[in-house]
C-alpha cells in the first residue's frame, strides 16, 4: 500500500475518472458528468489514489452532525483483492465527522461481507439496505 493514498482533499479528485466508473456501475449506470460533479461538490469525498491516479472512491452525504448516507463506494477492478476496500472503510469510519454520526445508511447489492465487518446490518431485503444505529451516542458525551 506504499504507493496508495486515501484523501478527502477535493482538489485531488479526478471527477472524470469517478464519472467514468460510475456511469458503468450497476447502481449509477449512465449517470451524467454534471450529476457526478454536483454530487461530489455536496459530499464528504474519500478518494483512493495510486501514484496520483484515481483508484477508488466513496462519498458520504451528510448533515455533519447526526446522519450520513454512504454511497458510490468502489475500487477499480485492477486494484481489488489487495485490501484497499477495507482500508477505505477504515478511513471513512475513523474520520472525525463519521465518528459522531448517530446513523449511517448504505444501500448495496455488492460486498456485504465487507460492510458486515464494519457493523452494517440489513434493515430490509436481505443484503440490500444496511444501517448503523447508535441510540446511545448522545449519552456518551
Image: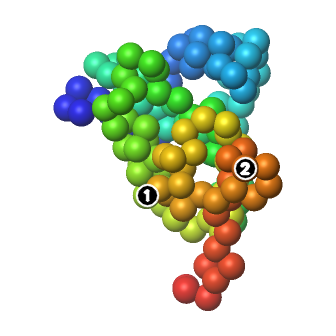
Q: How is the image coloured?
A: rainbow
The quarter of the picture where the C terminus appears is bottom right
Farthest residue toward the right?
124
Q: Secondary structure at mark 2?
A: loop
Q: Secondary structure at mark 1?
A: helix
Note whether 80 is above or below 137 in the view shown: above
Task: Give the number of marks.
Answer: 2
Residue depth check, mark 1 versus mark 2: number of the one nearer the observer: 2
Real-space CA distance between mark 1 and mark 2, rounded to the nearest whole angstrom: 27 Å
Q: Which mark is residue 12?
A: none
* Mark 2 crowdedness (10 Å alpha carbons): few <14, some 14-19, many ≥20: few
* Mark 1 crowdedness (10 Å alpha carbons): few <14, some 14-19, many ≥20: few
- Work out whether mark 1 precedes mark 2 in sequence or the reverse, and give the earlier one: 1
The percent coordinates of residue 58 (x first, y second) are 55, 36
> Label 2 near label 1: C-beta < 8 Å?
no
Note whether 95 is above or below 20 in the view shown: below
The percent coordinates of residue 93 (x first, y second) are 48, 56
Identity of the residue drawn at 58% across and 16% down: 21
Farthest residue toward the front?
126
Give the left or right position of residue 32, taking residue 65 as reference: right
Q: Nearer the viewer, residue 38 or 70?
A: 70
Farthest residue toward the bottom?
139
Q: Is residue 43 visible?
A: no
Give the left or right position of residue 92, taking residue 110 as reference: left
The percent coordinates of residue 102 (x first, y second) are 66, 69
Identity of the residue drawn at 42% across and 22% down: 55
Mark 2 = which residue? 126
Identity of the residue drawn at 49% across and 57% down: 118
Q: Which mark is residue 94?
A: 1
Q: Is residue 128 visible?
A: yes
Amino acid at each position: 500500500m506504499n504507493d496508495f493514498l486515501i484523501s478527502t482533499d477535493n482538489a485531488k479528485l479526478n471527477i472524470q475518472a469517478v464519472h467514468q466508473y460510475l456511469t458503468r456501475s450497476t447502481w449509477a449506470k449512465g449517470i451524467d458528468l454534471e450529476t457526478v460533479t454536483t454530487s461530489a461538490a455536496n459530499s464528504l469525498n474519500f478518494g483512493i489514489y495510486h501514484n496520483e491516479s484515481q483508484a477508488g472512491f466513496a462519498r458520504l452525504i451528510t448533515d455533519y452532525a447526526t446522519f450520513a448516507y454512504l454511497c458510490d463506494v468502489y475500487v477499480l477492478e485492477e486494484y481489488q483483492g489487495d485490501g484497499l476496500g477495507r482500508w477505505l472503510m477504515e478511513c471513512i469510519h475513523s474520520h472525525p465527522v463519521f465518528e459522531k454520526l448517530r446513523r449511517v445508511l448504505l444501500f448495496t447489492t455488492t460486498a456485504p461481507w465487507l460492510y458486515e465487518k464494519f457493523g452494517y446490518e440489513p434493515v430490509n431485503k436481505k443484503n440490500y439496505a444496511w444501517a448503523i444505529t447508535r441510540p446511545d451516542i448522545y449519552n456518551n458525551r
